[in-house]
Image: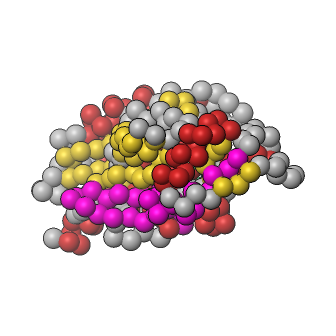
Amino acid sequence: MLLPTFDYYRPAGLPEALSLLAEMGEDARPLAGGTDLLVNLKLKKAAPKALLDLGSLEELKGNRTDDGKVSLGALNTASRLASGGPEVPGLLSLGAGALGSPQVRNRATLGGNLVTARPAADICLPLLALGATAVLAGPQGEREVPLDGYFQGPGYTVKQPGEILTRVLVGAPRPGVGGGYQKLGLRQAMEIALVNVAVYLELEGDGETVALARVALGAVAPVPMLSPGAAQALQGTPAGEKIFTEAAEAAAADAKPIDDHRGSAAYRRDMVRTLTLRALRQALSQAQGSKEARS
Ligand SMILES: Cc1cc2nc3c(=O)[nH]c(=O)nc-3n(C[C@H](O)[C@H](O)[C@H](O)COP(=O)(O)OP(=O)(O)OC[C@H]3O[C@@H](n4cnc5c(N)ncnc54)[C@H](O)[C@@H]3O)c2cc1C
């Protein structure tokens, strides 16, 4: 399958990229790793006249920690995130490491995953559980949008066509905080999740009471979603099997799966229960481990 013809631009900086986008409007599309966009061009699902390669934009690169917040560049590849480092939350590494194959992970970017916004996307889900905020740059300047409210439908977000997602802000990794990520597919690798669950758990100083929890569910609604019931069940209670089972039940009740050719709604709901329980155990072990390791 051949690519259609298009004009190729490689802007040197963010201002140039934004002004090219403003000039060309819907005729131009940003290009990051190309693992979604180039496939869609070949399948004729998209036909932009021009591609703007974001690869030279320093504003979208690297990670920095400032005042307890980490700012992650949109051009971080899944491989880079999966390999971790002091500034990358462990939960994000787990999700990024579950995306596609090594070849896909070497190209696929954080920004592309958030803009493509699939309901089961492996980078979106951990970021939602982490309470991340997207930074969108446009002709009027920058705006920050919490991910809880960013996703509008499959492949549809609050990002406007003239905007570029530059960075994502998350809390810096610290002791007493843990994450769990579970992905179920019809096969072991190269698979979009049938159900995936990301859990963020923050413990009080006693190392047992849950100070804050977020449970994000994938492939069970038109967008990656948070389970308010699970968060409520966990908050302020001692972490452990009893409350984890209640939270997993609440997550299954909050999920809004539908029957499709890959699995029934009832099966997906059951799997939300199972995967939430596993992810909670994983998050607790990480939170307690990280506490012991650093205290
Ligand atoms: C074989 C294969 C397996 C895959 N498996 C998985 C999987 O298991 N899990 C999963 O989540 N995904 C999977 N994907 C999908 C894809 O790899 C991810 O969504 C990836 O993160 C997209 O990033 P990219 O940099 O390649 O985006 P691109 O293809 O470059 O861009 C995707 C879209 O986002 C826009 N865009 C990109 N970056 C920006 C930005 N910074 N600002 C504004 N717009 C931007 C582009 O214009 C385009 O519309 C798979 C894809 C393939 C081909």
What residue appears at the point 30 percent right and 47 percent down from the top-left corner? 241
In the picture shown, does residue 102 fall above or below 195?
A: below
In the picture shown, does residue 261 fall above or below 110?
A: above
What residue appears at the point 62 percent right and 59 percent down from the top-left corner? 10
What residue appears at the point 36 percent right and 47 percent down from the top-left corner? 132
Give the residues in magenta: 50-79
What residue appears at the point 42 percent right and 28 percent down from the top-left corner? 254
Q: Can residue 66 be seen in this view?
A: yes
In the picture shown, does residue 128 fall above or below 171?
A: above
Of 229 and 151, which appears nearest the observer? 151
Left or right of 177? Residue 125 is right
Left or right of 50? Residue 265 is left
Left or right of 163? Residue 214 is left
Of 180 and 164, which appears nearest the observer? 164
Quarter-of-image position of residue 29: top right
Instruction: Report x, y in % for residue 95.
Output: 49, 56
Instruction: Report x, y in % for residue 42.
Output: 80, 47
Instruction: Report x, y in % for residue 269.
Output: 51, 33
Quarter-of-image position of residue 23: top right
